Image (cartoon, rainbow, N blue to C red):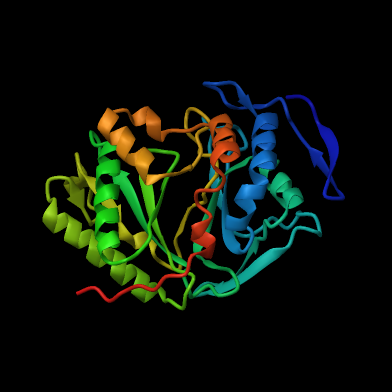
Amino acid sequence: MGRDRVIEVDGRSLKLSNLDKVLYPATGFTKAEVLDYYARVAPTLLPHLGDRALTLRRFPDGVEGGSFYEKNCPRYRPEWVGVHRVTGDDGAIDFCRIDSLAALTWVANLAALELHTSMARASDPDSPTMVVFDLDPGPPAAVLDCARVALWIRRVLDELGLVCLVKTSGSKGLQAYVPLNSPTTYEQTAGFSKTLAQLLEREEPGQVVSVQRKDLRRGKVLVDWSQNSRHKTTVCAYSLRARERPTVSTPVSWEEVGEALDAGDPGLLSFEAGQVLERIERRGDLFAPAAELVQELPALR
């Protein structure tokens, strides 16, 4: 496997290895192209990444090889790659602090294709800054079924006066988020999301399920409220995914969700790396309110 290179990023010297290695065999997408994508998306990605505990999902042999999750930042990291030390039930974990282009380039060079972040900032790990509804289709349900459920969620949240964002998972489903950025606990966010998921399940029992049991999920969309947990992570906006093609977890507008559903076209809710960079150029960061918008959860009964 060829082509190593030493570069300078933000005044830091980095050795990049195996740049010609193909990480997405179906498309020929190489490690060099992964590094290029993360370098170009960095200004938009880093505000959603740098202040959160980060779990890496690494694919040293590409998406068709094995993978592993890594919470503790590797000990062989450069001295300028910092850590977020977060203490939990199992002791302290030193998560990588990826808050600069140099640090992001270093971690991408580890073939960490997927970047999974906590719902809370690392400085206050018990206080989630948002609620997530992770919409996961049980075959033969697919992303357009998730679109329908996402629009139902938005309708309920609109009635509660809450702004909701949506992004593709980059895999099979969608994820809807309620930005909070106000004093909140996981007990509140999990309770809120569970109540809403169960409400949708009662209203649309043929299309929605709120529990993980596989025997109940066929042909339905799981509204996974359990992601609202201190110990869970969700794929970060603008992260690549380890699918056949280099798809990305991509923020979209609610108009795009409705248009895809009306057109019956799941391709309108799937974006690869190059498309995402073009979208950012045209539309900016549709996920920016996740880091900025202040809202408070109402009590649901």
Pinpoint residue 40: horizontal percent, then vertical percent: 68, 39
Q: How many labels does the image show?
A: 0
Residue 84 falls in image quadrant: bottom right
Q: Residue at x 54, y 41 (%)?
A: 283
Q: Residue at x 66, y 46 (%)?
A: 42
Tell me: 81 left or right of 65.
right
Pinpoint residue 216: horizontal percent, then vertical percent: 17, 48
Quick check: can you spot residue 143? no
Tell me: 301 left or right of 158.
left
Q: Which residue is drawn at 59% across and 71% down?
A: 86
Tell me: 53 left or right of 140.
right
Tell me: 10 left or right of 109.
right
Pinpoint residue 228: horizontal percent, then vertical percent: 39, 64
Of the pair 44 and 239, the residue shown nearer to us: 44
Quick check: can you spot residue 299? yes
Pinpoint residue 217: horizontal percent, then vertical percent: 21, 46
Q: Residue at x 85, y 39 (%)?
A: 7
Of the pair 8 and 64, the residue shown nearer to us: 8
> Which quadrant holds the C terminus?
bottom left
Relative to 169, say whether 299 is above or below. Answer: below
> Which quadrant holds the N terminus?
top right
Relative to 265, say whether 201 is above or below. Answer: below
Residue 105 falls in image quadrant: top right
